[in-house]
Image (tube, rainbow, N blue to C red):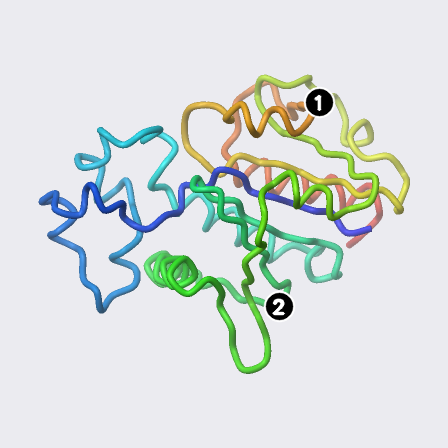
Amino acid sequence: MPLILVLVECGIELIPKQIRNHPSVKKNLSPKIYSSQLLDNALHSSAMKNLKDFKKRGRPDITHICLLNALGSALNKHGDLLLYIHTINNKIFRFSPEIRIARNYNRFKGLMAKLLIDGSIETGTSKLIGRFEGNLKELINKFEDPEVILFSSKGTLINSYKDLFKMDISKNYIIFIGGFQKSSFSKDIIDLSENIVSISQYPLDAWVVTNRIITYYEQTYEIL
């Protein structure tokens, strides 16, 4: 079975209406430029301070690096990765394994803003990014007998990748990795899994965790 990887609570959203008149937002915002419409802590930090959960928001760069790691992996090229992002505003999108995510950060921001505005990214007859119309619980329930693993520095530390994935190719492993910078998973996310795991004695960046988990899966099933 493919590994089902979900980047959860990603800091990707359009600039909220309540801060669109803030000077730091107005300075860069243009209706003609998609990338300028995405909330970005590097540009809008002074405007974001009164937003709820502002520490988890405005970090599209984290998702960008995670996606580059996941989509560029041998696991994805082998056809054994199902990749989703879940945003801070509870929108879920599935990424086609064939999509080539822009390496340039501003182009990526433009793509994400267009995705949020249009609901999908398509080319010709292919849907490169599509919306999943449901919540995370409904996404989990799509898969038969899923094993949901939530990765957190507060979880149970494993000593070896061999302790993570069993040699059972029929198992649907659903992996949750936080796509935010600071703070913790919301209670709604934590309630989705009883299996909370840590892979290091140190807190790791989301893209490091993404890379490691994919590598562990590749090693377990000898995907080179």
Q: Position of residue 51 (x, y in %)?
A: 27, 32
| Drawn side of residue 2 relative to residue 178, left or right | right
Identified at 65% across, 26% down, the residue is 199
Q: Secondary structure at mark 1?
A: loop
Residue farthest along the bottom direction in this orientation: 124
> Mark 1 or 2, which is nearer the eye?
1
| Drawn side of residue 98 relative to residue 48, left or right | right
Identified at 65% across, 54% down, the residue is 73
Q: CA distance from mark 1 to mark 2?
A: 33 Å
Q: Give the residue pinned by disc 2.
A: 98
Question: Front-most of 166 and 16?
Answer: 16
Circle 2 packing at 10 Å, graded few (<14), some (14-19), many (20+), is some
Q: Is residue 189 above or below residue 91?
A: above
Q: Give the residue pinned by disc 1.
A: 194
Identified at 53% across, 66% down, the residue is 100
Looking at the rendered image, the quarter that the C terminus falls into is bottom right
Identified at 25% across, 57% down, the residue is 36
| Drawn side of residue 144 relative to residue 158, left or right | right
Dot 1 amino acid type: Glu
Give the mark, 1 or 2, whose residue is nearer the N terminus: 2
Circle 1 packing at 10 Å, graded few (<14), some (14-19), many (20+), is few
